[in-house]
Image: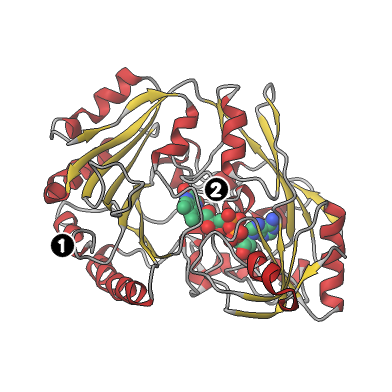
Amino acid sequence: VPALITPDDLGAYEEARRGFNLYADKRPAAVAFPESEKEVVDIVRYAPEAGLRVNVQGTGHNQMALPEELGDTIVVRTDRLRGVHIDPVARVARVRAGDRWGDVVAIAAGYRLAPQSGTSSTVGVVGYTLGGGLPVALGRKYGLAANNVLAIELVTADGELRRVDHQTDPDLFWALRGGGGSFGAVTAIELPLYEIPEVYCGWLAFPLERADDALEGWRRLTETAPPELSLTGRLLAIPPLPEMPEPLRGKAFAIAQVAYVGAEAEGAELIQPVRDLGPTFDTVVPGGPEALSRLHQDPPDPVPTVSSHMLVDALPAEAIPAIVAASGVGPGQPLLSLEFRHAGAALADAPTHGGARSTLEGEYVMFAATLATSPATVAAARAHYRVLRAALAPWDTGRAYLNLVEEKTDVAALFASDATHDRLREIKARYDPGNVFRANHEITPGRVA
Ligand SMILES: Cc1cc2nc3c(=O)[nH]c(=O)nc-3n(C[C@H](O)[C@H](O)[C@H](O)COP(=O)(O)OP(=O)(O)OC[C@H]3O[C@@H](n4cnc5c(N)ncnc54)[C@H](O)[C@@H]3O)c2cc1C
């Protein structure tokens, strides 16, 4: 078994248990950093013998949903299992468990190819894909990333390293694609890449006082957008930090965030109605596929955050003033950002060979976040999330998307139906009857049919 870092290792333990979200404060029995697939096998075989469970983490981005006390769990960090291999002819990437989206995007862009990456370069490819994978731009055209995965390599609870796909283990392959990290320690994943010669993306940003107009313009555009156009409506408070550019520092904006996969002329024509509203900043420009990973401006370094998420039905015009009134973003307000990502198109059409999370319920994906800089800011944010959720209640689908839930939650509500959750529990009982693997959002073994 590779070295286990335990609470007795003082400084090393504090460092090892820290994830990207600095607000998370989890105390596992031990943390391991395997350097090979063989070492992953060794840990998976060792843990149950020692009466311990296993939680696998790529980056610790989504640690928050785990319990604080993890005294029965070894956290397996995959940081040292790195190495992206791209076959530009077949347009396939093999990505190891520790690779982040930034690694794949950079290499693929050299071939004018792009993966179905999310908004952030620092998110783990495997963790993201096991949860479903909502791409920043290639979702409305090609669906959730998990639906397009070609094969997954993992160590299952019996200690075997396997390569699974549609043919070899259709049930396990289905569960892994959206059911999260409850089914094994994934060591690598094979993904398709897409030929993307050019994109047209950026922000149309308006002063917060114009939020009603700006978000209504964005909302109307979503009603007719083609699958190549992904639009996010955002309200964003730029923190008053010295590293922020002076014209933005400490100010709040309403933003129509544009990601068009195609030529500038077509993209410009599509977004013209919002441009006609006269944004203060217009950063929408043509670029290569790598521009998509800078679009959302997610923090490059670890930060403490708390968030809230909802899958939202179609938004009628009267929803916009309700959203603006309850946003909680602006001077003296508790939230850093509130966004609505337009889903629909291929994200709503169930493909033939989809996984456990094959579509998203609702037309929009709400995500709200706050920097957790003090207990008071966290308390204020959490209180405000309740206000926001109450304002959005008329359009709440009642379901949520696993990857964007960063609190302990009712896991059944993370799937399209209770039947999906029941099937996941039944597959868990077959592949991990002893409940060795603990995901952040846990599927527990159910009754075998
Ligand atoms: C800034 C930011 C932007 C984001 N943008 C998007 C987005 O655009 N689209 C989207 O869909 N999601 C997005 N997410 C959510 C992200 O996909 C989830 O937080 C995801 O769980 C992160 O995976 P990770 O490996 O980085 O995090 P971790 O916290 O390390 O892992 C989360 C969970 O994934 C499982 N897991 C991870 N690696 C393995 C493995 N090798 N084997 C088995 N299980 C494993 C485990 O259950 C683990 O607890 C974003 C998150 C952040 C913080």
Up/down of 71 relative to 236, above or below? below
Q: Residue at x 31, y 56 (%)?
A: 337
Question: What's the CA distance linking mark 2 and mark 1?
Answer: 33 Å
Q: Residue at x 47, y 38 (%)?
A: 293
Using residue 240 as the reference point, say whether residue 99 is left or right of it.
right
The answer to whether the residue bearing label 1 lies less than 8 angstroms from the nearest atom of ligand 1 is no
Q: Secondary structure at mark 2?
A: loop
Q: CB of mark 2 within 8 Å of CB of mark 1? A: no
Up/down of 142 relative to 373, above or below? above
Quarter of the figure that contains the N terminus: bottom right
Instruction: Using a 10 Å C-alpha cutoff, classify the residue at mark 1 as few (fewer than 14 neighbours), some (14 to 19) or many (20 or more).
Output: few
Up/down of 132 relative to 69, above or below? above
Q: Residue at x 58, y 32 (%)?
A: 106
Under mark 1, the amino acid is: Ala
Measured as percent of width and height from the top left, residue 27 is found at 63, 77
The answer to whether the residue bearing label 2 lies less than 8 angstroms from the nearest atom of ligand 1 is yes
Quarter of the figure that contains the C terminus: bottom right
Measured as percent of width and height from the top left, residue 154 is found at 77, 54
Using residue 337 as the reference point, say whether residue 106 is left or right of it.
right
Q: Give the residue pinned by disc 2.
A: 122
Q: Give the residue pinned by disc 1.
A: 325
In the rendered structure, find residue 299 and report the number of the disc placed on it.
Answer: none
Measured as percent of width and height from the top left, residue 214 is found at 17, 44
Q: Whereabouts is ligand 1, in terms of quadrant?
A: bottom right
Q: Secondary structure at mark 1?
A: helix
Using residue 101 as the reference point, say whether residue 245 is left or right of it.
left
Q: Nearer the viewer, mark 2 or mark 1?
A: 2
Q: Residue at x 65, y 27 (%)?
A: 91
* Residue 226 found in image quarter: top left
* Residue 187 vs residue 330, the one in the foreground: 330
* Residue 151 vs residue 421, the one in the foreground: 151
